Amino acid sequence: MKDKLNKLKTQLPYIPKTLVLIWHSSKWWSVIWAMLLFLSGLLPVIVVYLVKPIIDSTSILAGSGLEKIDILMFPIITLAIVVFLLPVSTSLLNLVRNIQAEKIQDSVKMQIQ
């Protein structure tokens, strides 16, 4: 454990330099990546919050029959859209990460030459 902490201490001074390198080489891709990362974390939370109205609406429908099916449609459609966006956001996040990595690699190559 002490070895890992010592290794971490030796690498800490490089973090600001690394962040500056990332920011200078791919500024807007970093912003897009951060927004997609936030969205990718938010979507599962939205799914959890959408399940409650679906369960509530289903229990109302169980007691009254299918006459009020309209109250169930909006939460289900919204949940379907959010579930569709989950893999889309992950794919976009991977794409942006790859582009960002290429930009950083190109920047480092240019500094070396």
Image (cartoon, rainbow, N blue to C red):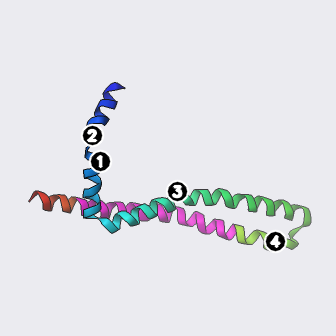
Please name the predominant secondary structure of the magenta segment in the image.
helix
Residue at 87%, 61% (x, y): give it.
Answer: 62
Give the class, few, some or many, for how many residues have Cα within 10 Å of label 1's Cα (few <14, many ≥20). Answer: few
Q: How many marks?
A: 4
- What element does badge 1 sit on? helix
Residue at 51%, 62% (x, y): give it.
Answer: 39
Residue type (three-letter) at the residue carrying disc 1: Ile
Query: Which residue in the protein does label 4 denote?
Result: 69
- Is 98 covered by the magenta stretch? yes
- Is 78 covered by the magenta stretch? yes
Query: Which residue in the protein does label 2 denote?
Result: 11
Query: Which residue in the protein does label 3 denote?
Result: 41
Q: Position of residue 75 (x, y in %)?
A: 71, 67
- What element does badge 4 sit on? loop
Q: Give the Cα separation between the discs numbered 4 and 2.
A: 59 Å
Q: Is residue 91 visible?
A: no
Residue at 29%, 41% (x, y): give it.
Answer: 12
Q: Nearer the viewer, residue 113 or 47?
A: 113
